[in-house]
Image (tube, grey):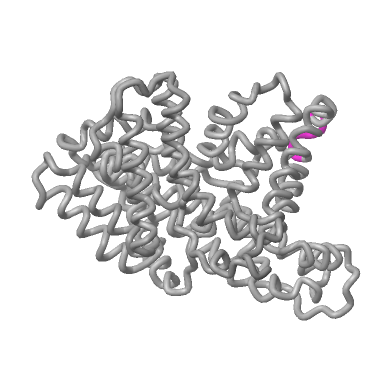
Amino acid sequence: MIFNDFTFLFVFLPVVLAVFFWLAPRGVRVWVLLAASFSFYALSGIEHAAVLAIGIVWVYAITAAQGMEGSRIRLIFAIVVPLAALFFYKYLGFFSRSFGITGANGEKFSLFEHIVLPAGISFFTFQLVAFAIDRYRGDISKTPSPGKFALYVSFFPQLVAGPILRYRQVADPLAGLATFRLERAAASSAITYIVVGLAAKVLIADTLGNYIEPWTDRPEALGSVTSIYVLLAYSFQIYFDFYGYSLIAIGLGRLFGFSFPDNFLRPYESLNIRDFWRRWHVTLSLWIRDYLYLPLGGNRCYIRNIVIVFAVCGLWHGAGWTFIIWGLYHGLLVGLHKLIGRAWSRMPRLLQIALTFALVSLGWSLFIFDFNGIVLFFGSLAGLNSAVVSVPGIEHWLVLSMAAAVCFGPNFERLAARAGEGARWPLAETLVYASLMVTVLLFINRSQDFIYFRF
């Protein structure tokens, strides 16, 4: 099930809200949301829901026992199962292909090629690992109840594509579920987040995705203008795809009393690549900093650690060499900025933003094409191909311009946070958001899965 789906919006979510607020006793609200979350996830496959459940039970059983704090043995045992599941489902086929692993008869393990990746396994695995490490460090001194821990990991608004949460960020809302009341202001804010997030996904990201899909299948037959359009369109597509999901997740969380952190801080306005990584997918960047970069020694071995963390970041995004190269590309840019940062900062602000956006957009091409496709695409980008299938029309440039205007224009988090602060929603705002939602529903049938679901 996905957020941009009639079944979710008009069946699943209303039923969960009705049971949570009116039908079930307040004391079982944790279990209501837990049942809803596993039902939501089980629709992608019972096996995948079982993987999630096993990871939750395993980590809880070990971390809840006495002697967890300071015990490296317990920590290793706690994280080995979720990491092993992640490796099996996401990376086993990649490593078998990369290193030529074969069976006894010299045949490749075809089983690895048909493993279906559980949606969002990287996200909930990182939350399980974070909880175990926090218990080991003593940052979580009191073990939560089994139901609260399971809900922390599996809560459906952020289960599949984040944000990646620490337990302390949701401890208070979990404790207050039995007494939570949805006030008008919180409901207005939640609805604003959801509507704007759906609009970002359905009207901008999916429109751009549908436009460029025919061209990405033939990178050898693009002119330089079409190649530039594909590069810019995909850059905005992945931004609004993940940004839209994050806004919807924040809104859904607020319906049940959870305040999720913003995962995007206007990243395409970054002045440099280091600034970009403070703004893009914030919760992933913080996770990598706290649980990988700092334990490796942080700035003491800067170049080595930057290479490691960005290689891991690339591999986290996908099981393929193009993803690893993408991570190393960003690591190289971060390392170069450390060398030329002073000269870079003396450039005009607008030029810094434009160059950073261009470098980031070039990197996204590694998400679209394999290595052969990359070579062909950059040949097209340089104008080396003579056989051009088609060029973007006026409607293509209009949607791209709209995406740029929205990206660099209004701050939707601020607007959503202020929504409904008064006793009533202003009529003008009501009409705007109602019209936006109607437009979303008109085009939702051509909407696609979220890009980050595969990560």
Give the total of numbered labels.
0
Above or below, 96 relative to 114: above
Question: In screen coordinates, is 375 left or right of 182?
Answer: right
Residue 24 is inside the magenta segment: no
Frontmost residue, 415 versus 448? 448
Report which quarter residue 238 is drawn in. bottom right
Task: Say which residue appears at 63% left-offset and 37% top-offset.
Answer: 277
Task: Say which residue appears at 19% left-offset and 46% top-offset.
Answer: 31
Q: Which residues are magenta?
A: 345-350
Q: Position of residue 282 (x, y in %)?
A: 54, 37
Q: Position of residue 7 (x, y in %)?
A: 31, 68
Above or below, 54 relative to 175: below
Question: In screen coordinates, is 273 left or right of 62?
Answer: right
Frontmost residue, 393 versus 55? 55
Above or below, 442 relative to 282: below
Q: Position of residue 33 (x, y in %)?
A: 24, 48
Task: Say which residue appears at 29% left-offset and 43% top-offset.
Answer: 151
Q: Position of residue 130 (x, y in %)?
A: 45, 33
Above or below, 67 relative to 193: above
Does the rendering let one see residue 21? Answer: yes
Does the rendering let one see residue 241? Answer: no
Question: In screen coordinates, is 27 left or right of 234?
Answer: left
Q: Quadrant of the N terminus?
A: bottom left
